[in-house]
Image (cartoon, helix red, strand yellow):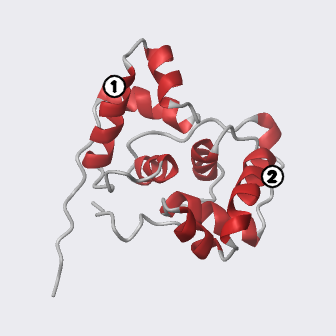
Amino acid sequence: MTTLKAPITPITPSQKRLAAHLLQGLSNSEIAAQEYLALDTVSSHLRGMRQNLHCPPRCSRPVLAHMLLVHRQVVPPPVPPLCLPFAATEDDRLLLHAIAEHSAPADIARAARIAPCDLKPLTESLVRTVGATSATHLVGLGHALGLLGESGTSRPPAHVAVS
């Protein structure tokens, strides 16, 4: 049996502006303040992005960021100068891919081959090492550094349709 995968719907210019803030690791409140929008409006735009990209309604912000970049809806964030000497280990790459492709902590830990209790400290350590502000920003920088996306080995999660 063959399943057809629906093409994505490109995001709107307003959504692209908000997505750029998302990739910088800003929270919904911070995005709302910078764009002079109501918090509900930001949430609505993020929900619309998830729908356009066929992401699950409650997928994590890093997964949404990854999908925006995989589908070339936005460009990766600029790499901070302190990030340039970063050399990812195989464990770093595994964790980065897991964060980009899974939303549930247990699934991330399983994909990264780490104990669930180690997920938070290892993620925080990788965020600090790379110079990111959050796991979402980390995913954006992972694309900018070529660790995710076309030049990396990452692909859209299996539950998400690809155009």
Task: Choose between 108 and 129: the one closer to the eye.
Answer: 108
Res 149 seen here:
no
Q: Amino acid at mark 1?
A: Asp
- Which residue is label 1 attached to? 40
Q: Is residue 124 above or below residue 2?
A: above
- Residue visible at 56% across and 69% down? 106
Task: Choose between 89 and 159: the one closer to the eye.
Answer: 159
- Residue visible at 69% across and 73% down? 115
- Which residue is label 2 attached to? 86
Relative to 21, 144 lies left or right: right
Task: Choose between 163 and 104: the one closer to the eye.
Answer: 104
Q: Could you tell me which quadrant the N terminus lies in?
A: bottom left
Q: Amino acid at mark 2?
A: Phe
Q: Secondary structure under badge 2?
A: loop
Q: Is residue 163 above or below residue 12?
A: below
Total numbered circles:
2
Badge 1 local density, few (<14 within 10 Å), some, or many (20+)?
Answer: few
Res 104 seen here:
yes
- Residue visible at 72% across and 48% down? 127
Residue 126's tag is none
Q: Is residue 117 above or below residue 76?
A: below
